[in-house]
Amino acid sequence: MIKSLKELPQLAKQKQVKTLAIAAAEDASVMNAIIKAKELGLIAPIFIGNKQKIEAIASEFSIKISPSEIIHSEDEAKSCAIAVKMVSDGKAHILMKGMVQTATLLKQVVNKEFGLLSGKLLSHLALFESVYYHKIFGLTDAAMNIAPTLDEKASIVENAVEAFIKLGVENPKVALLAAVEKVNPKMQATTDAAILKIMNERKQLAHCIIDGPLALDNAISREAAAQKGISGPVAGDADILVAPDINTGNAIYKCLPFLGGASCAAIITGSKAPIVLTSRADSEETKFLSIALGVLTSK
C-alpha cells in the first residue's frame, strides 16, 4: 500500500497514458490540475465546454491547451453528455467533472442509452493522508448515496475493497461507523453494521475484515478503542471508513482537509470507468491527485 498520496502520480505514470474527458471544463483549478497530469505523462485530456471561455481561462493563467484538445459545447448538460458518451464509446478511459453540478453530470452517467452503469452501485471513495493517522485511509460514501440501505452498504463496501486491492491492500480493514459501539435497534446504522459484520464472517462480503458498529475515534485510535474495551484487528487501524449516510460522510470529507489539513484524492467507483468527482471547492492538488487515482484504478 502507498505510504503517501504523493506516490499516486508516480505509480500512475507506470500505466499507459489514459484519455481523460472533462465535462464542463471551464475552470482554472481543474485545467491546471489536468495540465500537470498531462505534463507528467499520465493523461491525454479532452476539454469539453465553451471553447471561448476555456481559451480565455487558459490565456489568463498561462495554461497551454491545443485547439485540438477542445470540443466546443455551450450547454452544461450537453458537455456532460458528450464526455460520458466518449467514455462509453471507448474514446476516453476516465471521466472528470469540471465546473458543473454533480447532479447534472450524474444524470448523463446513468443515461440508459450511453451511460456508464455497470450493474454495480455507484459510490464515492475518497483517500486521505493525515498527519494524525499512521497510514492512508479511505472514506465512503460522501457524495453519492444519500441514505443507503443494507444492500447498498454492502455494495459500497465491495466497491471500496476492490479499489483498495488495486492499490495493493489485499485484505483491507473496514470500519462501519456509527455514533455508538453497541447495537441499538433504534439506531439503524448500528443494526446494519452488525449484519454486515456477520456477512463478512460468513464470507458473503469477502476479501476484507469488517467490524462495526464503531464510533470514529475507535476506528482510528487504538488508545480510544482500548479505553472502551474494544479489540480486534480493525479497531484503531481501519483502512476504510464507511459512513452510515451522506450527511456523516460529507461532513467528515469536508472536515479532514479544511480543519485537519489532510490531503485527499477522490473518485466514483462501481461505474464502467473511473469518474473523477471532486468538490468545486477542493484544491487543485486534490484534483490532480484524484486524476492520478483515476488512472491507477482504470482498466
Image (spheres, rainbow, N blue to C red):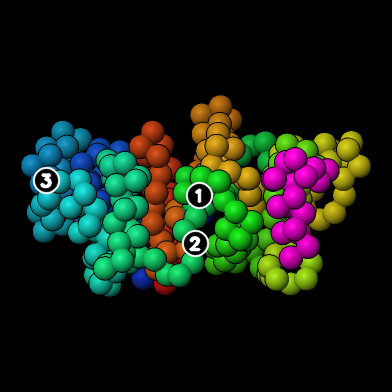
Mark with earlier residue (3, 1): 3
Relative to 38, is 17 above or below? below
Whether residue 287 sits left or right of residue 98 in the image: it is right
Question: Which residue type carries mark 1?
Answer: Asn
| Residue at x-position 74% and y-position 72% | 203
Spatial CA distance of label 2 from label 1 is 9 Å
| Residue at x-position 24% and y-position 39% | 27
| Residue at x-position 65% and y-position 48% | 241
Query: Residue 171 versus residue 134: which sits nearer the camera?
Result: 171
User: Which residues make up the magenta segment?
Assistant: 182-200
Whether residue 227 sits left or right of residue 90 in the image: it is right
Which x, y percent locates residue 293? 45, 56
Question: Which residue type carries mark 2?
Answer: Leu
Q: Which residue is mark 3?
A: 74
Mark with earlier residue (2, 1): 2
State the mark number for residue 121: 2
Tell me whether circle 2 and circle 1 mark residues in contact (CB < 8 Å).
yes
Query: Residue 201 versus residue 162: which sits nearer the camera?
Result: 201
Q: Secondary structure at mark 2?
A: loop
Residue 218 in view in this figure: no
Given this view, does label 3 or label 1 mark the residue nearer the observer? 1
Q: Secondary structure at mark 3?
A: loop
> Residue 45, located in which quarter of the rendered image?
bottom left
Q: Which residue is mark 1?
A: 145
Which x, y percent locates residue 112? 31, 66
